[in-house]
C-alpha cells in the first residue's frame, strides 16, 4: 500500500518527522512530494526557501520512513505524480480539514494528522529574534 504526503519540508523538525512516521505506519511505501525552490518562493515569499530542494530531498531520503521523494513545481505536476503512483492514502495536516486538497479524488482515502505546535515559520522567527 502506497501513502503520499506533500509539502515544503524546508527546515525539518519534530512535527515533520512525527507526521512522516505516522504516514509510513499506514502502508508499505511512503512517497513524499516536495515543492521546488521556485514554488516555495512563489507560495511563501522571497525569504523562503531556507534549504534548497536538493538538500531538502537528501535529508528526507535519509529518513528510514521515506521511500521515494519527488519534486513538483505546479499543482498539475503534483497531480501527475499522484496519478503515476496511485497512492491508497494521502496524509494531510489537520489544518486542511474542510479545505480543497490537490489530488484528493485520486486517492482512496485522506487521513488527517493532528498538527503539533512545531512550525517551520515559527522556528525561523525564533532564529531571527535571537
Image (cartoon, grey):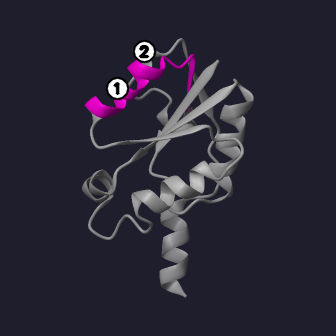
Q: Give the class, few, some or many, for how many residues have Cα within 10 Å of label 1's Cα (few <14, many ≥20).
A: some
Q: Earlier in the sequence, mark 1 or mark 2?
A: 1
Say above or below: 2 vs 125: above
Say above or below: 33 vs 27: below
The residue to which callout 1 is attached is: 79
Check residue 106 in the rendering and tell me which mark sits there, or answer none. 2
Kindly indicate the quadrant of the structure image that contains residue 14: bottom right
Residue occupying the point 34% across, 51% down: 36
Could you tell whether 80 is left or right of 113 in the image? left
Kindly indicate the quadrant of the structure image that contains residue 80: top left
Q: Nearer the viewer, residue 90 or 68?
A: 68
Q: Position of residue 8 (x, y in %)?
A: 44, 51
Q: Nearer the viewer, residue 117 or 87?
A: 87
Q: Position of residue 21 (x, y in %)?
A: 71, 40
Q: Is residue 32 magenta?
A: no
Q: Secondary structure at mark 2?
A: helix
Could you tell whether 77 is left or right of 21 in the image? left
Q: Quadrant of the C terminus?
A: bottom right
Q: Nearer the viewer, residue 129 or 106?
A: 106
Q: Secondary structure at mark 1?
A: helix
Q: Quadrant of the N terminus?
A: top right
Residue occupying the point 42% across, 69% down: 50
Q: Nearer the viewer, residue 102 or 79?
A: 79
The reply to whether discs 1 and 2 touch (Cβ–Cβ < 8 Å) is yes
Q: In this picture, which residue range is highlighted in magenta? A: 76-91
Residue occupying the point 41% across, 14% down: 105
Is residue 107 in view from this perspective? yes
Q: Is residue 86 magenta?
A: yes
Say above or below: 22 vs 83: below
Amino acid at each position: 500500500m502506497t501513502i503520499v504526503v506533500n509539502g515544503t519540508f524546508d527546515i525539518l523538525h519534530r512535527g515533520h518527522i512525527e507526521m512522516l512516521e505516522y504516514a509510513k505506519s499506514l502502508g508499505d511505501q511512503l512517497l513524499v512530494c516536495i515543492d521546488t525552490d521556485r514554488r516555495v518562493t512563489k507560495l511563501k515569499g522571497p525569504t523562503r526557501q531556507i534549504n534548497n530542494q536538493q538538500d531538502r530531498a537528501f535529508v528526507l531520503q535519509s529518513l528510514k520512513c521515506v521511500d521515494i521523494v519527488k519534486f513538483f513545481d505546479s499543482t498539475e505536476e503534483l497531480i501527475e505524480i499522484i496519478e503515476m503512483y496511485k497512492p491508497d492514502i494521502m496524509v494531510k495536516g489537520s489544518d486542511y480539514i474542510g479545505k480543497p486538497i490537490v489530488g484528493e479524488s485520486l486517492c482512496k482515502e485522506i487521513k488527517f494528522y493532528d498538527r503539533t505546535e512545531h512550525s517551520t515559520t515559527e522556528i525561523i522567527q525564533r532564529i531571527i529574534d535571537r
